[in-house]
Image (cartoon, rainbow, N blue to C red):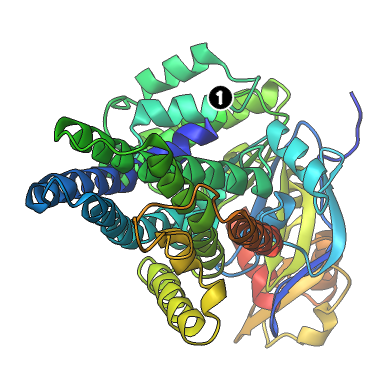
C-alpha cells in the first residue's frame, strides 16, 4: 500500500506533466513536419532532435517536481508521525517513493516519443524505431540524475517552494558550469543527444554513449544513497 | 505472559542544541495497565514518545518497547507492528478519503479487526467517501482513533487522545480504553485532562522540564496524599511542620495548610501537640498533586 500512497501523492503532478509533454511533442512534430519538404530528409530528423531539446527541458522540470515530497516534506505538513509509525523502515519508504518516481519518469520519457512516432507515421514520415528508443534511453539513462538530485534536495529541505527552487537552481547552475568548463561531462548535452548526433544526417549514433549513461546513472545512485543516509539520520 | 515492562528506559535523554527536551528518563511502564503520562506543555512528553517509536534518536541512554531496542532500526520496525499510536496532532493524509485511509492503514497489520472497524465507522458516523482534508477536527480525531482501536496491539500509545473530541466522544474514548485494557492491551497515554486520567488510569507518570518527577500508582496517590488544614490561636511556627513527607506549607495569619505526600498522621499529631484549634484532613485530587509536583520544579 506504500505504492498506492506514493501514487496518490504524485498522480496529479504526473498526469499533468504526462499530458503536457505528450501534447507538446505530438503537436510540435505534427505542425513542424508540415513545413518540411519531402526531399529534406535530414531536416525532419533535425526536427526530431529539436523536439528532444524541448522535451528535455520539460522532462527535467517534471522529474524534479516528481522528486519532491517524502518524509521531510510530510514533517512540514504534519503527517510524518503517521507515516513513521507504520511498520516500514525509512529506507523502504524512500525506496517506494523513488521506484514510483523512476517508473513515472520512464513513462514521461516514453509516452511523448510514442506519440511522436505515431504522429510521424500518420504524416507518412516514419521514423526509425531505434531512433525513438535512443532518445528515450538518453532521457531515462542520462536524465535520472536530475530526479535523484531532486530526491536528495527534498530530503534536506522541507519547504514546499524552497525545495524545488533549490533543485531547479542546482540544475541550471550545473548546466552553466559544466557547459563553460567541463563540457564533455555536461549531462544536459548527454541527455539532449548533443554528444551522439550526426550533424550531417541528424540521426543518433547506433552506439549509445554508454559510458556517459553509466556515469550519470552511477551519480544518480550515489545521490539516492546520500538521500537514504540523510533520511535515516534525521529526527522527526 | 511475561511481567517485563512494556516500556523501559534507562537514562534516556534528548537535547536540541542547548535545550534538553528529556533528561535522564528512567521510565518503566507495566504490562496490562493504563498509564497516564502527565506534564505541562513542552515538558517532553511527545519527544519521549517519539523516541520510543524511533522517530527521534535519543542523545543518550537506551530504551526498549515490548522488549525491542528503540534505537535499533530493525527492532524499531518490529515493535511498531505491535504498537498502535495516535499522535498529538492526529496526522492523516488529506488527499485520501476516509475509506482509503482505513484500507491503507489496515494493509500493514495482521491484527486488524474488520468487525471493530465497521462498528467504529458506524459509532463515529464517519463519512467513508469524504476526503480527510474536508473532515472537521473532531472527525479527524475519531478517524485517527479508529486506526488505532481497530487493531489488537500489545501496546497502545496515545498522545492527547481526547483533544478535539466532544464530551460524548471523550466518554466513548475512555470506555474503549478501559475495555482494551481489560482485553490485555497495555495503554500509555499523555493528557492534559486530569479528570479523564483520574477516571481511567492505574498508574501516573509526571514529567516536567524533561525530568520524570513522579512514577506511581493512582491508588498510592489516593492513599497517601493529604491536605491538612490547621487553625491555631496564634500564628503557628512553620518549621515545626517541616517533617518527612511534607511537600508544602502555606500560612495565612493563624491558618496553615500542609500538603503531605505521606506521613499526614505525623502532621496531625504535631498539630495536636501545638494545641491546634482545628484540624481537618482531606484527600488530595490528582489535579492538586500534579500542580504541586510541577510547581516544585
From the viewer's perspective, is residue B273 above or below residue B82? below
The image shows a total of numbered marks equal to 1
Residue B283 shows up from this direction: no
| Residue B102 image position (x, y, % from top left) | 45, 27
Question: Quadrant location of residue B254?
Answer: bottom right
Rendered residue at 21%/32% (across/down): A121
**In the image, is residue B1 above or below residue A175?**
above
* Residue situated in front as seen by the camera: B95 or A39: A39
* Position in image of residue A193 (x %, y %): 43, 59
Q: Residue at x 71, y 70 (%)?
A: B210
Q: Residue B131 versus residue A228: which sits nearer the camera? A: A228
Name the one closer to the observer, A66 or A47: A47
Quadrant in which the C terminus of chain B appears: bottom right
Q: Is the residue A163 above or below the residue B155 in the image?
A: below
Name the residue beneath numbered marker 1.
B107
Secondary structure at badge 1 equals loop
Query: Residue shown at 65%/20% (left/top)?
Result: B111
Q: Position of residue A29 (x, y in %)?
A: 18, 48
- Residue nearest the viewer, comparing B106 with B239: B106
Give x and y (percent) for residue A13.
31, 48
Give the class, few, some or many, for how many residues have Cα within 10 Å of label 1's Cα (few <14, many ≥20): few
The N terminus of chain B is located in which quarter? top right
Q: Residue furthest top?
A: B115
The quarter holding residue B275 reads bottom right
In the shown orientation, is residue A172 left or right of residue B8? left
Visible residue check, residue A220 = yes
Task: Give the image quarter of residue B139.
Answer: top left
User: In the shown orientation, is residue B90 left or right of residue B75?
Assistant: left
Chain for disc number 1: B
For residue B127, side relative to residue A104 (left or right):
left
Amino acid at each position: 500500500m506504500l505504492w498506492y500512497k506514493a501514487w496518490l501523492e504524485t498522480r496529479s503532478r504526473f498526469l499533468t506533466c504526462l499530458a503536457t509533454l505528450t501534447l507538446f511533442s505530438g503537436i510540435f512534430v505534427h505542425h513542424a513536419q508540415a513545413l518540411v519538404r519531402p526531399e529534406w530528409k535530414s531536416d525532419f530528423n533535425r526536427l526530431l532532435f529539436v523536439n528532444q531539446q524541448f522535451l528535455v527541458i520539460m522532462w527535467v522540470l517534471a522529474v524534479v517536481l516528481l522528486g519532491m515530497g517524502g518524509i521531510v516534506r510530510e514533517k512540514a505538513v504534519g503527517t510524518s508521525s503517521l507515516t513513521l509509525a507504520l511498520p516500514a523502515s525509512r529506507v523502504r519508504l524512500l525506496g517506494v517513493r523513488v521506484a514510483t518516481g523512476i517508473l513515472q519518469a520512464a513513462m514521461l520519457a516514453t509516452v511523448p516519443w510514442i506519440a511522436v512516432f505515431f504522429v510521424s507515421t500518420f504524416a507518412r514520415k516514419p521514423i526509425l524505431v531505434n531512433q525513438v528508443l535512443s532518445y528515450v534511453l538518453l532521457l531515462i539513462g542520462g536524465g535520472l540524475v536530475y530526479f535523484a538530485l531532486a530526491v536528495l534536495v527534498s530530503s534536506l529541505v522541507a519547504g514546499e517552494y524552497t525545495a524545488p527552487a533549490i533543485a531547479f537552481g542546482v540544475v541550471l547552475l550545473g548546466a552553466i558550469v559544466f557547459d563553460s568548463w567541463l563540457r564533455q561531462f555536461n549531462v544536459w548535452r548527454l541527455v539532449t543527444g548533443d554528444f551522439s548526433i550526426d550533424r550531417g544526417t541528424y540521426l543518433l549514433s547506433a552506439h549509445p554513449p554508454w559510458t556517459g549513461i553509466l556515469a550519470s546513472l552511477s551519480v544518480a545512485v550515489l545521490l539516492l544513497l546520500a538521500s537514504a543516509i540523510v533520511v535515516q539520520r534525521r529526527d522527526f | 505472559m511475561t511481567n517485563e515492562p512494556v516500556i523501559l528506559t534507562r537514562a534516556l535523554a534528548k537535547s536540541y542544541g542547548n535545550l534538553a527536551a528529556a533528561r535522564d528518563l528512567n521510565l518503566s511502564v507495566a504490562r496490562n495497565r493504563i498509564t497516564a503520562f502527565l506534564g505541562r506543555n513542552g515538558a517532553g512528553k511527545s519527544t519521549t514518545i517519539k523516541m520510543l517509536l524511533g522517530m527521534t534518536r535519543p542523545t543518550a541512554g537506551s530504551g526498549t518497547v515490548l522488549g525491542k531496542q528503540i534505537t535499533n532500526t530493525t527492532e524499531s520496525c518490529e515493535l511498531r507492528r505491535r504498537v498502535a499510536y495516535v499522535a498529538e496532532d492526529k496526522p492523516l493524509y488529506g488527499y485520501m478519503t476516509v475509506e482509503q485511509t482505513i484500507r491503507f492503514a489496515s494493509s500493514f497489520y495482521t491484527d486488524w479487526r474488520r468487525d471493530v472497524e465497521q462498528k467504529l465507522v458506524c459509532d463515529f458516523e464517519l463519512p467513508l467517501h469524504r476526503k480527510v482534508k474536508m473532515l472537521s477536527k473532531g472527525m479527524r480525531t475519531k478517524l485517527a482513533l479508529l486506526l488505532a482501536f481497530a487493531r489488537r496491539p500489545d501496546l497502545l500509545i496515545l498522545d492527547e487522545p481526547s483533544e478535539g473530541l466532544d464530551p460524548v466522544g471523550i466518554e466513548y474514548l475512555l470506555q474503549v480504553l478501559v475495555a482494551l485494557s481489560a482485553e490485555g492491551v497495555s495503554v500509555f497515554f499523555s493528557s492534559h485532562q486530569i479528570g479523564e486520567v483520574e477516571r481511567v488510569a492505574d498508574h501516573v507518570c509526571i514529567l516536567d522540564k524533561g525530568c520524570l518527577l513522579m512514577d506511581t500508582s493512582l491508588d498510592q496517590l489516593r492513599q497517601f496524599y493529604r491536605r491538612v488544614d490547621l487553625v491555631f490561636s496564634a500564628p503557628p511556627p512553620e518549621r515545626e511542620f517541616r517533617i518527612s513527607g511534607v511537600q508544602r506549607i502555606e500560612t495565612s495569619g493563624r491558618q496553615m495548610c500542609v500538603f503531605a505526600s505521606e506521613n499526614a498522621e505525623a502532621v496531625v499529631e504535631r498539630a495536636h501537640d501545638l494545641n491546634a484549634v482545628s484540624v481537618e484532613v482531606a484527600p488530595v485530587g490528582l489535579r492538586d498533586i500534579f500542580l504541586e509536583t510541577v510547581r516544585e520544579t
